Amino acid sequence: MEGWDPTTKSTLTQIPLLSVKAGPRDGGAWTQRLKEEYKALIAYTSMNKAKDNDWFRISAANPEGTRWTGKCWYIHNLLKYEFDLQFDIPVTYPATAPELELPQLDGKTQKMYRGGKICLTVHFKPLWAKNCPRFGIAHALCLGLAPWLAAEIPILVDSGMIKHKDDASSSNES
């Protein structure tokens, strides 16, 4: 955690670490892992709400907990930009981090792969590998998606690649 800003370090230390090393093919162990994932997500969400820093909602989209969907948002220049968020849990999870997708932004930045998968290879993947199996979905959101949004959304807005929903609707009305 050297070189991290104090806020990130503080946030990360408050997200519970996971202990069950299990993926979607591991039956009962996967169920235990999912329980840990939910506990970490609840803790992270509660912490964000307490700090008035609520920025995402996700839930499992299937009973197996292998597909997740939701929304994430970023405030820039006092305007809220909201995006669909989705990802699948890889078969090799937790050894492999989930690939977080923002389909609405597909093709709008170089820091994204086909299908709207955000680029996490250089900074996040080595960190994930080093902390496997202790990191989970909440950690991916905290250390992967949050910094990506903070770095990319202001650039996309300022360059005109994305428009605020109010700007888009007013230009459609003209």
Image (spheres, grey):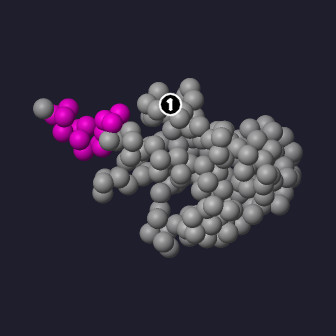
User: In the rendered image of this protein, does residue 108 appear above or below residue 99?
Assistant: above
- Residue 16 left/right relative to 54: right
Please give the name of the residue rendered at 32% of the width and 41% of the height, measured from the top-left corner. Answer: 158
Residue 165 covered by magenta stretch: yes
Outermost residue, bottom side: 50
**Amino acid type at image mark 1:** Gln
- Residue 82 left/right relative to 25: left
Residue 170 drawn at (x, y percent):
18, 39
- Residue 121 left/right relative to 104: right
Residue 134 drawn at (x, y percent):
78, 58
Q: Using the image as rendered, state which of residue 61 and residue 49 is in the foreground.
A: 49
Residue 75 drawn at (x, y percent):
38, 54
Q: Is residue 11 visible?
A: no
Quadrant of the rendered image containing residue 93: top right
Is most of the magenta stretch helix, strand or loop? helix
Q: Residues within 10 Å of mark 1 (few under 14, many from 20)?
A: few
Residue 12 drawn at (x, y percent):
64, 64
Residue 70 covered by magenta stretch: no
Outermost residue, front side: 3
Please give the name of the residue rendered at 59% of the width and 37% of the height, measured from the top-left corner. Answer: 119
Please give the name of the residue rendered at 56% of the width and 48% of the height, measured from the top-left corner. Answer: 145
Please give the name of the residue rendered at 31% of the width and 35% of the height, measured from the top-left corner. Answer: 160
The residue indicated by pointer 1 is: 110
Element under disc 1: loop
Q: Is residue 49 visible?
A: yes
Q: Tell me where the magenta segment starts and ends, as one range.
A: 159-173
User: In the rendered image of this protein, does residue 90 appear above or below residue 2?
Assistant: above
The quarter of the rendered structure image containing the C terminus is top left
